[in-house]
Image (spheres, grey):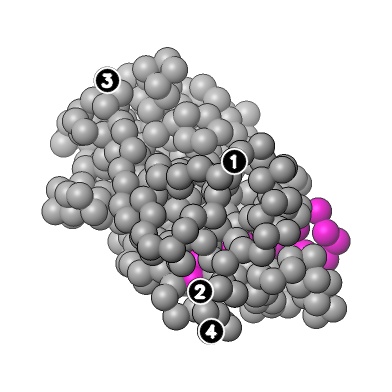
Amino acid sequence: MQSRWKGSQMNEGELRADSESSRISRRRFVKTLGASGIGLASASNLSGRELPAVADGDVSITYAYARGDPDDPSSISPRTKTVSADWYNDLRAALSSYNTIDLGGIEGVLNAAVVPGDEAERSSISIGVTSESIVSQVQELLDETPIEGSIIEEAAGSDGPDLEPARQFDLESGFSVPGGVACGETEGIATLTPGLHDPETETTFFATADHLYADTESTELTLVGNGQRVEIGEVAKRYRNEDFSLISPTSDFTPAHAVDGAAPRQVAGQFTRLGLADLKARSAEIHKIGAMTGHTTGEIQAIDGITCVYGDPCKRGQLKWGDQAEFTDGDSGSVSYAPDPENPDEQVLVCGLNSARTWWPGEDYIWGTGAYILQEEYGYTF
C-alpha cells in the first residue's frame, strides 16, 4: 500500500544547594503570589502552575487523575503521593520563574522547558537559542534558577518513509479500537490515541494528531487494517496549537481506553504536571506504541515546554522525552504512558501526546503536548 505520509516531523547541573539557598527567594515568591492571587496554603492536591512554597518535611501532591472504575469515565479522581518538601520547593521555584516570563516571546529563543531536579541536582530551565549571547540574557531575567542552553542551527526536514504501518488493527478482532494502531483520513497515516473523554458531553472520542488534516479537505477518520481502510469517524473538533483532533464515531467501531500491544493495556487516566516531574526525578521509564515504530521506551527530559521551531504561534505545554530515532512519520497521535503506580500490573496512565521528533542538530527527543494540558484547558481525560 502506497501512502501519503503526514509527518511527525511536521517540517516541523549544577549540584543542588543546601536547603536554605534552594528555596525560593522571598522577593520572587511575593511577586508570584501577587500575580496569581493565592495565599500561603497547603500544597496538598495541587497539580497546576500556582504552587505555594511549603515548610520543611513532606508534602502531598496530586500526581495523576485516574478512574476508580476503568469502565466508567465519570469515576475519575485525583491520585496523591508524598514528596520531599525540599524537592517540591526547588521545582516550584523553577516553575514560578519560568511562568513569570514568556520565553517564547523573546527573539532568538526557539524552545524552552523546565527540567525537574532530583535529590542531587536542582531543577533548571533548558532553552534552545539561535546564539550563545541569549543564554546570559535569559539567566539575568530568571534570577536564581539554573539555565541549560543549547544552540539550534537551522536544518531542513526530510521526507517520511513509504512503508506499511507496523501496527494495524485486526478488523476481525471486534469493534473496540485501542490507541497505538494506524489510522488516517483517505490516504495519510497517523496513530490513534486511546479514547479521549469529554465529561461535559459525556462522550468518548477517537483522537489523533491534528496535522494529519493539515493538507486535506477530508474530515473523515479511517482505520487501517488487513490491507484496507474502514471509515470510523468524522472530525468533531480540531486543536491546532495542541496538535490533536477529536473524532466522533460514525460506525460500529468505538474508542477504547486502552493501548494496543501494551502490557498492561488498560488506560485509567493521566499524569499531572507534578506527576511528570516526579517521573523525571525518579528517572522512570515511559513507553510509546506507534503505528510505525511500535513499542519504544525512554525517559522524560523536560516538562511544560515551549517550542517555536515549527508553526505560529509557539506550541506550549510540551513534554520532551526519549530519542528522536525511536519516532518517525506516522507515529504522530500516539501517546507516551507509564504504569499506574497504584495498579501497575493492570493499568497505565498517559503522560502526553507524541507529535514530532527533533530534526535539528544539538537536541534529541520526541515532543508533544502533555496530557495535563488537555485536562486543564478542555477537561478531556484519557
Q: Residues within 10 Å of mark 2 (few under 14, many from 20)?
A: few
> Which numbered mark, 2 or 4, is in the foreground of this view?
2
Count of numbered circles on the image: 4
Disc 2 from disc 4: Cα separation? 12 Å
Numbered mark located on residue 252 in the image = 3
In the rendered view, does 207 fall on the left or right side of 7? left
Q: Which of the two labelled residues, at mark 2 and mark 1, occupies the earlier sequence position?
A: 2
Which stretch appears magenta?
Answer: 103-117
Residue 264 visible in the shown view: no
What numbered label is drawn on residue 19?
2
Identify the residue at image location x=19%, y=30%.
69
Residue 286 percent coordinates (x, y): 34, 62
In whole angstroms, how far apart are the C-alphas of marks 4 and 1? 30 Å
Distance of mark 3 from mark 1, alpha carbons? 51 Å
Say if mark 4 contacts mark 3, CB within 8 Å: no
Residue type at numbered disc 2:
Ser
Dot 2 or dot 3: first in sequence order is 2
Mark closest to the chain's N terminus, 4 or 1: 4
Q: Residue at x 67, y 60 (%)?
A: 26
